[in-house]
Image (cartoon, rainbow, N blue to C red):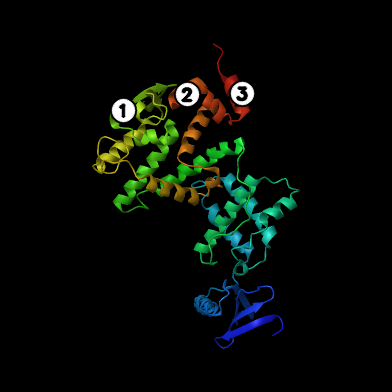
Amino acid sequence: MGFYLSEHKMYEDECIVSKTKQSGEIWQCRIWISEDKAYIRKSLKTRNLETAKERAKKLYLETQGNLAIGKSPFSLTTRKGVDAYIQYRADDVGTRIVKGRLVTIKTHLSHWLKFIGRDTKLSELERRSCLGYFNWRKKTTGNKVKDVTLKNEQSTINAMWRYLYKERHTDFENFEFEKLSPVTNVDDIRRATLTDDEYRDLTNYLRTYCSKKLNKDSETYFKKQQFRLYVLILANSGMRVGELNQLTWKNVKTRFEESNGKKLRIAEINVLHQTSKVRKDRIFISRRGDLFDELKELNEEFSLDKDLIFNTNGKSLSMDLLRWHWHTVMSDISIENYRERKVTFYSLRHFFITQRIKNGASFAILSKVCGTSIKQIEDTYWHTDIKTLTDAVLASEIL
């Protein structure tokens, strides 16, 4: 047998199960494609011969089915796969992602193509094909690439691969990568907020994700609208998740206020000490009072309990369902490395405080609005750009 240590032929020798020195105890399969006059090769990922034969039969029949509808197993190289994904994401610019994100995606995938080979067939790749990618990147950059950058690249690569999987160009969803040390330094912990671009992507996508056009069923539409308003109120009020979950309508009042010649809809919110983490009452003003008005109309439309502002039949919303929607949206808009960064609902409070600091709000005012100490804000949120803060100070009028 020469190169092959063991071979078992099926379907008139068009499908062959074999072992080689390289594959060790793992059975492989090669299937002859007469139109291309070449074999496709796949690992059967088993040491058991009978299991290998069953998997080879299934693979052979699937291949023949694809050929019958004109889908060649040799149709895509990694370069073409990347091109298809980039075109797919380019269509999202302006709705789900910003142009800068597309540039980042292209950069990440250009690194991957150099590692994996631009002319490698998608069908030749396996789940473990990216093991060694991190070490290769460190070696080729003189060890200058940061672990957080590598994690972001991993996220982009696997997002691309999931797209190709959904398009049926590959038979597995994600690559395995070598483990990196967990992120522990303070700067990286502070990454648990969203960037301006990420928040813009999030709010743009929520319009589509929660729209009536895509959610014909009234119950699904209602629950997604609740989710959308939950996210936006957290981001515009700076409230803690637990505080919002227990907020009642009698503690929310909306009204118009004039600011710089414009009428703005605001909300006056009373957080009771019983629902606050710091066990203190506080009353503060929140922007986007229209969000509360919209929520009230939604609740009235679906005849919900009139006590808790967010409820399902008088009970607090299911956090499991809210988190499910959150993870779905984070994945859909490809928020980089969001799990490792621990980007959660609480990150919307981080985002609120960060934005207010950038806009020149004092730590003293923010401490009262958010129900926390000035020291806590200084310690946790001093990750805003120093130049931004300096500009805010210089732009202030001298009294």
Q: Residue furthest right?
A: 142
Q: Which quadrant holds the N terminus?
A: bottom right
Residue at image position (54%, 53%) is: 89
Q: Could you give the CA–CA distance between mark 1 and mark 3, rounded to whole angstroms?
A: 37 Å
Q: Tell me if 118 is positioned left or right of 160 in this view.
A: right
Residue at image position (47%, 43%) is: 202
The answer to which of marks 2 and 1 sits earlier in the sequence is 1
Q: Which residue is mark 1?
A: 251
User: Observer-nearest residue: 272 or 108?
Assistant: 272
Q: Give the residue type that dot 3 points to.
A: Thr
Q: Which residue is mark 3?
A: 390
Q: Give the residue type that dot 2 points to.
A: Ser
Q: Tell me if 320 is positioned left or right of 89 in this view.
A: left
Q: Percent position (x, y) of residue 327?
A: 46, 49
Q: Could you give the CA–CA distance between mark 2 and mark 1, rounded to whole angstroms?
A: 20 Å
Q: Percent position (x, y) of residue 156?
A: 58, 52
The kind of secondary structure element at disc 2 is helix
